[in-house]
Amino acid sequence: MKELVLLKLGGSLITDKTRPYTPLLEVMDDLSQQIVTALRSQPDLRLVLGHGAGSFGHVAASEYKTRDGYPVHPLSSTEDAIPPKTITGRVLPRSGIRPLRSTAT
């Protein structure tokens, strides 16, 4: 039986939250190698990978004071700040993983 696992990589893990818009590429490379190892050792594993925004999303969240409950205008500011190809387009393919990208709206 194929096992379906959701793995969420937290934004604090994959970005430097002390420096705006700063991905931790070495960490992402290491994580992608671990993911490849898991997928190769467990061929029936189906993996759904999600990730937080970290230092990309927190800049917009701070600017629009979302912690205080204020709505974000425009709503997509946080989403637009995330470099979608950093993980899915650059890091994972170098490891041999071909991700399907989806953005919830």
Image: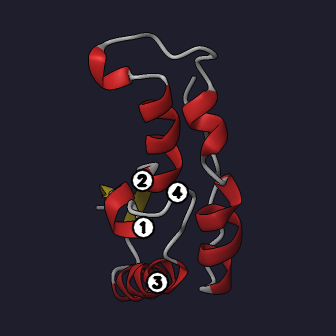
Give the residue displayed 59% in from the left and 66% down from the top: 87
Give the residue displayed 70% in from the left and 60% down from the top: 85
Where residue 99 sits in the image (x, y, percent)?
62, 62
Quickly name the residue at label 4.
Answer: 20
| Amino acid marked by disc 2 | Gly
Left or right, 69 with respect to 21, comes to left
Quickly name the residue at label 1.
Answer: 16
| Amino acid marked by disc 4 | Pro
Label drawn at residue 40: none
Q: CA distance from mark 3 to mark 4?
A: 29 Å
Cβ–Cβ under 8 Å for marks 2 and 1: yes
Q: CA distance from mark 4 to mark 1?
A: 7 Å
Where residue 35 sits in the image (x, y, percent)?
41, 78
Tell me the SS state at disc 1. Answer: loop
Cβ–Cβ under 8 Å for marks 3 and 4: no
| Amino acid marked by disc 1 | Asp
**Mark 3 vs mark 4: in front:** 4
Counting residues from the start of the chain, the first of labels 2 and 4 encountered is: 4
Label drawn at residue 54: 2
**Mark 2 vs mark 4: in front:** 4
Quickly name the residue at label 3.
Answer: 36
Q: Vertical placement of 94 versus 60: above or below? A: below
Q: In which quarter of the view is residue 81 placed? A: top right
